[in-house]
Image: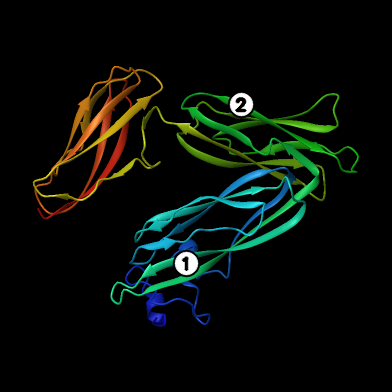
Amino acid sequence: MSRLTRPALVALLFCPPLAAQDDKLPNWAQKFFSGKDAPPPPVILHDFGTVPKGTVRDYSFRMTNIYAVPMQVEPIQPACRWVSVVKYTAQMDPLETGQIDVRLETAGIEGPKQVEFKVRFKGQDPTTKREFSRDARLVILADSRLDIAIDPGAITFGPVPAGRAMAKSVQVTYTGKQAGWAVKGAECNKDLFTVTTEKVPAAATTYKVTATLKEQAPPGVFNEPIVLKTNDPTAPSLTLSATGTVHPPLMLLGLSPTNKLRLPPVGVGKEHKQVVSVIAEKPFKVTAVDGQGDGLSVVIVPSRRAKSEGLILVFEPEKVGPVRKVLTIKTDTGESVSLTVEATATER
């Protein structure tokens, strides 16, 4: 296996790293997280800070393939019981983005903790066909307070239809020795929530924390911190998580969150059909689909169900090459949703 040269490291986006390990050179695997313009840090770090015992929190490490070849991510397994990998992007083409979603669970730990784990990136030299790989180092920090507990471990909204307000609560209990311990308020993303705190009557030092998701919260997945302010000088701030998904008025079943669909390669003069289902919270009809062309057409299939309709995508290319179309699906309710279709036409 050939050595990774300095020009190969500099020529990001134009050529891949051509070998595996060389401790005298910058770690090109770290640059999946720092980007091509920033120097790679020695470790990729996330600090959850001081959290109540029992806390469940998620965090996403974002990464981008800045190299000119597809890169694979090997299975990731942190060597501890309090940090787990929920999901990760297993392959990224050049310029594609991905993420590694980790979960912190502090029910079984106390005090300050640190865990380091490796993420191995693997690719292939397009000229020699030799494989190369290198590890990025990720570090998680957290301080689990034994004298502060949260039940349940996070504020979890789950799926919420767009335009609907919803409230969820947790209880935070203090069992330490500080007299008059109190939660004095909370900070949060005010575009999404309002948060209230109130002492639970006839209980130990327990506070009920309620987050109310606003009606105008935008569609999409959210994972937001809620920071509780206390009068404890050793832990003046405690961080909880509020997670959920606001469903848009129209949804496309079975697609990625970005509503992107990749069709298999199709020969010129041949045909490929794919069904896409559109659903909503209220009755609707699809009235038009804009953006068709370059061999891609759409047939609207009326449904007996008032809250769903089907579309048949037909790809029948006339010439060789890639095709990328953004379809706008319009309805009689005035709402619309976009679908990005990518395909490749090959020789007959």
Q: Which residue is mark 1?
A: 31
137 over 191 or under it: above or below: below
Q: Earlier along the polypeptide chain: callout 2 or callout 1?
A: 1
Give the secondary structure at mark 2: strand
Q: Residue at x 49, y 65 (%)?
A: 120
285 over 120 or under it: above or below: above
Q: What separation in Å lies between label 2 and label 1 (alpha carbons)? A: 40 Å
Image quadrant holding the N terminus, namely bottom left
Q: Residues within 10 Å of mark 2 (few under 14, many from 20)?
A: some
Q: Residue at x 24, y 48 (%)?
A: 264
94 over 232 or under it: above or below: below
Q: Which residue is mark 2?
A: 167
Residue kind at label 1, given as amino acid type = Lys
Q: Looking at the picture, how far across and down is residue 132, in whole percent? A: 41, 73
Q: Residue 194 vs residue 123: left or right?
A: right
Name which quarter of the figure residue 56 lies in.
top right
- Decide which of 194, 302 is in the foreground and name it: 302
